[in-house]
Image (cartoon, grey):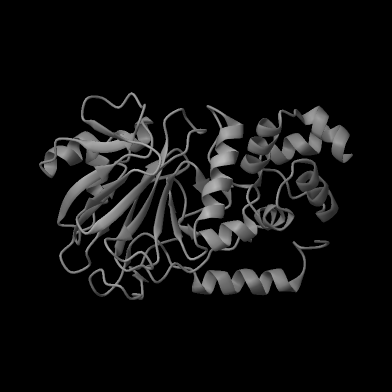
Amino acid sequence: MVGLRLQPACFIFCTHACLHAVDDRSIASPWPAQPRQAHLFSMPAASAIPLEDELGDVLDKAMRCAGLNEEQVAERTGISVEKIRNAEDYRYDELSDDELRRLAAALHLNEVGFAALASDCYPRPPVTGLPFCVHPMHLPFGVGVVNAYAVVDCATGVGVLFDGGTGFEALQQVWPRAVTRIEAVFLTHPEAEHIGGIPGALERHGLATFYGPRCGPTGPACWPLGEGETVVVAGYQVTAFSTPGHCAEHNCYLVRPKGVPQARALLISGDLIFAGSLGGGYFSCSQLLSHARRIIGALPVSTVIAPGHGPMTTVENERKYNPFLG
C-alpha cells in the first residue's frame, strides 16, 4: 500500500486500536466460567506490554527462513546492502514506503503488517469475551518479557498454569492474588525461561507432574501430550497441538471451558505465534511456518492468542496483519 506509514488513515486506525486495546497485564471477567460471553477488564498498569519483535527482528527471521543473505536480498529488491543491514539493526526510518513494499514482496511477507511495524503502528486488538479469567504474568527477560498464564475460575481463583517463567522466585513476584490454587501445569517447550518456575509451582500446589511436549527432555515429572490429545482439568478442556519448529519439542494448547465447545477459546501459543511475528525457527524454519499457518488457519477468528513473549492478540488480527501469516 503506497504511503501506508504517512497516510492519515493509519494514524486514525492505530489511535483507535490503542484506545480499545486491553492492557493484558491482568485480564479478568466478572463471573465464573459459563456458556456466555464475559466482559474482560484490565487492572491499571504503567505501560502496555511491547511487541516482542520490531521490524528488524522480522526482517532477520524472514531472511533466515528464506535462506537469503543481505547481498541476495539487495539484488532482488534493488535496495542497498547498507540499508538492509541498518534495518536489521533497527535503523529503518530511512526505508521508503516503496522499499518496504519491495522487501515484503521479496520475502513473501504481509505488506500491510510489515509497513505497520515500520511505523510503530501494528494493530493491537481488544481482547474480550473469554468465559474465564486469564492472568498474564510478565517476567523480565532480555529487553522484553517472557509470559506465563494462569487460567482460572473468576469466583474461586482455581485453575491451571501455562509455563513457569524464568524461575519460581520471579514467578512469585508477579503472581496474582486472585489465583488461589493451580490444579495442573502445562509447558509449551523446555527452554529455561519457560520451564524455570515449574518445579517450584508443582511443589507449591502439591502436584507431582506437569504436561508437556511428547519428546522433550523435560525430566521424569513430565506427562507427555501429543497432537490432539486432550486433558480435562479444573473445569477446562485443554487440547495439545504439536508444533515443532522453534525447538524440536513444542506444544500449543487450546483452552475451552468443559462442555461448552461454542465458547470463545484461548490459544496458548508459546514461541510459535507472537503478535506481529513468529518465534525464531531455530530447529526448523519450514516446520515453524507450516505449523503457524496450520494453527492460525484452523482456529475460529475469535480465538484469543496468549504468546510466550509480548502482548496478547487474536487469530483475526494475526490473519490480517502478521507479516508471516497475513
Side of 68 relative to 293 (left or right): right
Residue 195 or 16: which is nearer the viewer? 195
Pinpoint residue 112: horizontal percent, then vertical percent.
71, 58
Residue 168 lies left or right of residue 91; in this view the side is: left
Q: Which residue is the extreme one toward the left?
A: 206
**Residue at image x 82%, y 29%?**
72
Residue 295: percent from the left, percent from the top?
51, 49
In the picture, the quarter occupied by the N terminus is bottom right
- The number of numbered badges drawn on the structure is 0
- Direction from residue 219 to residue 317 in the image, left or right: right
Q: Is residue 282 above or below residue 139?
A: above
- Quadrant in which the C terminus is drawn: bottom right
Quadrant in which residue 37 is drawn: bottom left
Where does the image place residue 325, in percent across and percent down from the top left?
63, 50
The structure residue drawn at horizontal position 54% and vertical position 41%, both measured from the top left corner, is: 291
Q: Position of residue 73 (x, y in %)?
A: 80, 34
Residue 80 visible here: no
Q: Quadrant of residue 85?
A: top right
Query: Which residue corresponds to the image point at 81% horizontal and 63% vertical from the top-left?
Result: 3
Left or right: 195 as drawn, with respect to 8:
left
Choose top left, top right, bottom left or bottom right for residue 16: bottom right
Taking depth in this image into account, of 164 and 18 the one nearest to the observer is 164
Give the answer, above or below, for where 202 lies relative to 258: above
> Could you tell me if residue 123 is visible in this image?
yes
- Identify the residue shown where x is 22% and y is 64%: 153
